[in-house]
Image: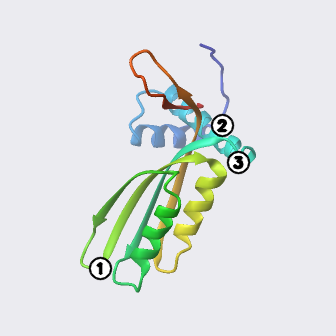
Amino acid sequence: MERFTISMDDQLFQQFDKVAQKRGYDNRSEAIRDLVRDYLETTRLEKDIHGYCIATLSYIFNHHERDLASQVTSAHHHHHDITLSSMHVHMDHDNCLEVVILRGTIQDVRRFANQVIATNGVRHGKLHIVPIEFSQEHHEHSSVPHTHSSPLT
């Protein structure tokens, strides 16, 4: 494990400490490690659109809006290769929240998420991407090859 020293002005240091404590970090090192991971992932996602990722897509929509639910469902069926799982929550009499777990190339996942979020009537759409190493594995404990997805950071 490497150690390094960071210099920052007192005001910035105090603000960082307050935020880290509010978020429940036991120490500054773990807060800094998370910032570095986030920075590395952001940089990787800007450059490598062909790499693999696992992602969550969340969005809210009014299920009474004409054909909206069927349009969103149809989009999922057309991209069944990247949709791993979804959860549908009824928020009130009109609004639904869906959370979808996706896995595929960064480019394909972004394209699909943008299609869903841009659908007329979908609100509050957010995509969270984590770059991964994706591999097909065959182990002694199983006769069927299966996938492994490991975070890159």
Looking at the picture, tell me which residue is in the foreground, 23 or 121: 121
Residue 77: which disc? none
- Choose the circle earlier in sequence order: 3 or 1: 3
Say what amino acid the circle numbered 2 marks: Leu
Q: For the point 70% across and 45% down, which residue is it?
A: 50
Q: Is residue 150 above or below residue 141?
A: below
Query: Which of the 4 quarters of the picture holds residue 151?
Result: top right
Q: Position of residue 32 (x, y in %)?
A: 56, 32
Q: In the rendered view, does 40 fall on the left or right side of 135? A: right
Q: In the displayed structure, does residue 151 sit left or right of residue 87?
A: right
Closest to the observer, 122 or 6? 122
Q: Quadrant of residue 96?
A: bottom left
Report which residue position mark 1 lands on: 94
Q: State whether residue 105 is above or below residue 140.
A: below
* Cα gap from disc 2 to disc 1, whole angstroms: 40 Å
Give the image location of residue 2, x and y in percent: 63, 15
Q: Which residue is mark 3?
A: 49
* Disc 3 from disc 1: Cα separation: 36 Å
